[in-house]
């Protein structure tokens, strides 16, 4: 029996997806749960497994085609007993796609492949395409794969197994796959990948939407820096990950947003939408791109909860395990360019937010210290915070009050009551 493969719904607000790559060619056999194709949305790229075992007999969409959710994109000929299998696809009407169908003879299928397969040579064990793809990208040999202990059925190495191995192994340079390059005299013209196109569209749209204004302040984080040093070993032994400045800053921001509700709002036409919860998006740099996963209801999390959430969403984003629904719904955003040793910057607002906080690197500097006994000069750990805000809603006074509130919350934080 022939079954339909439809464009899946990747999130509540996702209405369409872009075909990035078919992992199987026409005429190829495929196992259930084996990766069939990769699709991209305006939130995230995802690998889509097959819901049936069988043979890929028809394809209705090519790479870079944009397809609505629920539309048929391929057909699989399967020997499975579908009377006992209830799948999502059988509940969706099949549109008339004869005009876009790839031609085929009655008893013969034309095979036209644009999929590049990674050749690993002979292997003793079976590995799924997603595991082989990750291994190829990370420079992991097949012999190394065969030594990994798998947690899947029959000891099979799963995606989680190889990601755990990559996380624990020493970092090694990754050989980048070459992009398509068109040479024109003294210039190289390189096609943007899917993610870069999305980033370009979002950044341009934000600049066209919001009236960006910036204020910058300097913060003394000496006490926090000392706390990080004294707690580094014990925290990592207890929690399994490194304690960073980000949760401290998030905690200060949450408190400031409570006191300045305009910064936790958004604009809808001529209306102002005040959000009941504080949902903070944190910018995470990934390979040749950027994603902003969201930590929801931050006001309900204590400091340790923020630490765990920040580590969790950042780790899953870098490992391509974040879901599209976790990339939307932010009410304020934070970006930490200080990790790249940058002193300060002017970040672009993440729509539909009205504010974004940029975090610079922490540096020791000579600072004038004022006290009742007179002024003195000391070496302090300092960082710059830069706030970008939408002047359509927030005036200079409001933006200045907010960033100063964040500064005070950081400098006066009760570190003894954190955990």
Image (cartoon, rainbow, N blue to C red):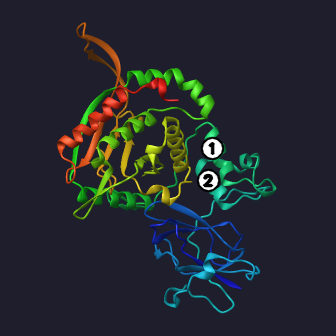
Residue sitting at the far top: 373
Residue 152 on image: x %, y %: 75, 55
Instruction: Determine whether 262 is above or below 200 in the image.
Output: above
Quadrant showing the N terminus: bottom right
- In this rendering, does residue 86 appear at all? yes
- In this rendering, does residue 344 appear at all? no
Q: Which residue occupies 37% across, 52% down? A: 331
Residue 379 on image: x %, y %: 34, 15
- Which residue is under mark 1? 166
Q: Which residue occupies 44% across, 32% down? A: 245
- Which residue is under mark 2? 134
Compared across the picture, whether 280 is left or right of 396 comes to: right
Q: Secondary structure at mark 1?
A: helix
Instruction: Please tell me in which quadrant of the rendered image residue 38 appears.
Output: bottom right
Q: Which residue occupies 78% across, 57% down? A: 153
Between 403 and 1, the one lying in front of the other is 403
Mark positioned earlier in the residue sequence (2 or 1): 2
Compared across the picture, whether 155 is left or right of 118 comes to: right
Between 51 and 222, the one lying in front of the other is 222
Residue 195 on image: x %, y %: 43, 59
Between 250 and 102, the one lying in front of the other is 250
Q: Secondary structure at mark 2?
A: helix
Q: Which residue occupies 62% across, 76% down? A: 88
| Distance from the alpha carbon under mark 2 to that under mark 1 | 9 Å
Compared across the picture, whether 2 is left or right of 383 comes to: right
């Amino acid at each position: 029996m022939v079954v339909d493969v439809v464009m899946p719904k990747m999130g509540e607000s996702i209405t369409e997806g872009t075909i990035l790559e078919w992992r199987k060619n026409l005429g190829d056999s495929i196992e259930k749960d084996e990766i069939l194709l990769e699709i991209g949305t305006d939130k995230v790229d995802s690998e889509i497994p097959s819901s049936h075992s069988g043979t890929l007999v028809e394809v209705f969409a090519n790479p870079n085609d944009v397809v609505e959710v629920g539309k048929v994109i391929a057909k699989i000929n399967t020997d499975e007993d579908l009377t006992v299998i209830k799948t999502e696809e059988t509940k969706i009407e099949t549109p008339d796609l004869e005009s876009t169908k790839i031609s085929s003879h009655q008893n013969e299928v034309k095979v036209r492949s644009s999929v590049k397969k990674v050749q690993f040579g002979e292997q003793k064990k079976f590995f799924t395409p997603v595991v082989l793809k990750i291994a190829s990208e990370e420079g992991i040999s097949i012999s190394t794969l065969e030594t990994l202990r798998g947690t899947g059925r029959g000891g099979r190495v799963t995606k989680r197994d190889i990601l755990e191995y990559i996380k624990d192994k020493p970092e090694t340079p990754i050989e980048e796959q070459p992009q398509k390059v068109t040479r024109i005299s003294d210039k190289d013209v390189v096609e943007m990948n899917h993610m870069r196109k999305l980033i370009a569209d979002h950044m341009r749209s934000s600049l066209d939407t919001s009236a960006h204004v910036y204020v910058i302040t300097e913060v003394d984080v000496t006490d926090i820096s000392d706390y990080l040093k004294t707690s580094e070993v014990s925290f990592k032994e207890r929690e399994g990950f490194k304690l960073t400045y980000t949760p401290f800053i998030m905690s200060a921001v949450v408190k400031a947003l409570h006191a300045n509700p305009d910064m936790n709002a958004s604009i809808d036409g001529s209306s102002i939408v005040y959000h009941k919860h504080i949902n903070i998006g944190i910018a995470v740099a990934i390979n040749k791109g950027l994603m902003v996963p969201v930590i929801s209801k931050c006001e309900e999390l204590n400091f340790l909860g923020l630490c765990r959430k920040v580590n969790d969403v950042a780790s899953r984003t870098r490992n391509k395990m974040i879901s599209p629904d976790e990339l939307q719904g932010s009410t304020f955003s934070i970006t930490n360019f200080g990790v790249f040793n940058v002193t300060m910057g002017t970040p672009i607002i993440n729509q539909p937010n009205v504010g974004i906080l940029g975090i610079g690197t922490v540096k020791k500097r000579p600072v004038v210290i004022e006290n009742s006994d007179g002024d003195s000069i000391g070496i302090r750990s300092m960082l710059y915070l830069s706030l970008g805000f939408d002047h359509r809603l927030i005036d200079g006074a409001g933006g200045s009050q907010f960033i100063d509130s964040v500064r005070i919350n950081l400098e006066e934080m009760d570190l003894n009551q954190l955990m």
